[in-house]
Image: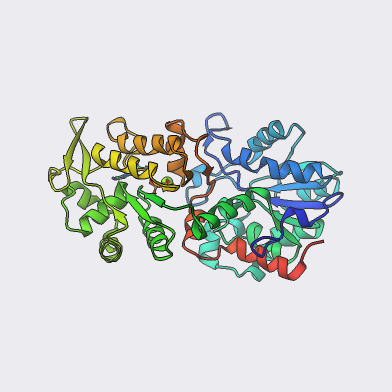
Amino acid sequence: MRFGICTLDEFSLRGKTVLCRVDMNQPVDHENGTLKSTARIEACAPTLAEISNAGAKLVVLAHQGSDIEYKNFYTTRPHADVLSGLLGKPVTFVEDVCGPTAREAIRNMKEGDIILLDNVRFCSEEQTLFEMKLRLSHEEQAKTQVVTKLAPLADLYVCDAFAAAHRDQPTLCGFEQVLPSAMGRLFEKEYCVISELMEAPQRPCTFVLGGAKISDAFLMLETVLAGGAADRVLTGGLVGNILLLAKGETIGQASVDFIYKSNYEEYIDKARVLYEKYADKIVLPHDLAYVENGQRKECKIGAVPLAIGAVDIGSETAKEYVDYIFASKTVFVNGPMGIFEEAPTELGTKLVFEALGDTDAYTVVGGGDSVTAAKKYEVNKKISYICTGGGALIRFLTGEELPVVKALRHAAKTFGAR
Ligand code: ADP
Ligand code: MG
């Protein structure tokens, strides 16, 4: 038991039918039906190997794509092949989620068998829009089709989907109401890393916050400052721009327009309050970069040409941030320092990530685009911990009890281990 949640150590698995919910959601190449990355499949493979090798009948549940961005909706068939390669044993793909075909396949399993069911979000009750509109309680989620059809066939539910732990959906929070449940190894690991980072970081502990997901970034900024986890927060990207604007600095009219156009106006006041309260801990860029005729140009804060927007931190700021990183024992990065996807505006992000690769500090990177940046600058293997989840991670850092954590704790109390 850890964090009030059962772990795999507490269950004997031989001969048991185990439903394991993972997060293998990956970018898909729709032209040829292949996965553009297999990182999340690799991350959960050890848990699946452990369950299967212990002699369980393993039924894997996963989603692929979001119904909000429907174009990314896809079957989990390609995932079965990738998983099979990683585990070195057959993974049978079943083209059904909880209908008669899926149930028949589960009933026919033998010890050590693995099946992967199709995309759970093909069931409407599993979709994000359904979650947001209906807000089913966990007890109500236990009455959904997917739970009522699959739970009677299983002995144990395992959730290894930390990246989806902020979602309140039946395959994530419903089974815990009716089955003994445990977290998988990846879930356990991510939970551990992040809670240590929040509670007892090696100091000095520096957070680097950038990117464009403003609501999440400000939530996190407030949490790590108010909770005392951060000794220093280095800011860049749009987050930095909003803080600079709140402080009354000139960041270029295009940046200001962008902030208003994106409805981030409310964050200017929030930024002002936070900056006044934590001025000694928040580090703002003192030079910025912009693009003119396709070329990178840099200038001091206050001198950004009016019509142009700031799209990266300047090289002096980047060097200062690198020094801060080398002087820290823990560094957490969420969000790039600029539009790193384009060559003229990648410098700030590149220098920060290269420093992350070189420092001896304990380094954690979270967020989809930040992980992409870590790969782009070839430091992903040198980062101490790359979180598979962005949204879950940020909500965790804010101190909120994640829905899946709540459900797993409920199962630990109700059913214990067996
Ligand atoms: P993550 O996915 O790591 O959590 P975000 O999604 O919050 O990060 O932000 C990443 C995006 O922010 C990138 O696509 C990047 O181009 C963009 N970005 C970074 N700096 C700026 C900026 N100054 N203005 C506009 N967009 C920015
Ligand atoms: Mg992103």
Residue 5, image quadrant: bottom right
Which of the four quarters of the rendered structure image does ligand 1 lie in? top left
Residue 283: x and y in percent read 29, 52
Which residue is drawn at the image coordinates 65% and 51% (left, top)?
160
Image coords of residue 348 (percent x, y): 31, 38
Quarter of the figure with the C terminus? bottom right
What residue is shown at x 50% (from left), y 35% (from top)?
382
Q: Nearer the viewer, residue 35 or 411?
A: 411
Residue 396: percent from the left, percent from the top? 51, 59
Can see residue 99?
no
Residue in front for this viewpoint, 248 or 318:
318
239 left or right, relative to 354: left
Residue drawn at (70%, 58%), measured in percent from left and top?
146
Which color scheme does this rendered protein use?
A: rainbow
Work out whether residue 275 can be spotted.
yes
Q: Quadrant of the N terminus?
A: bottom right
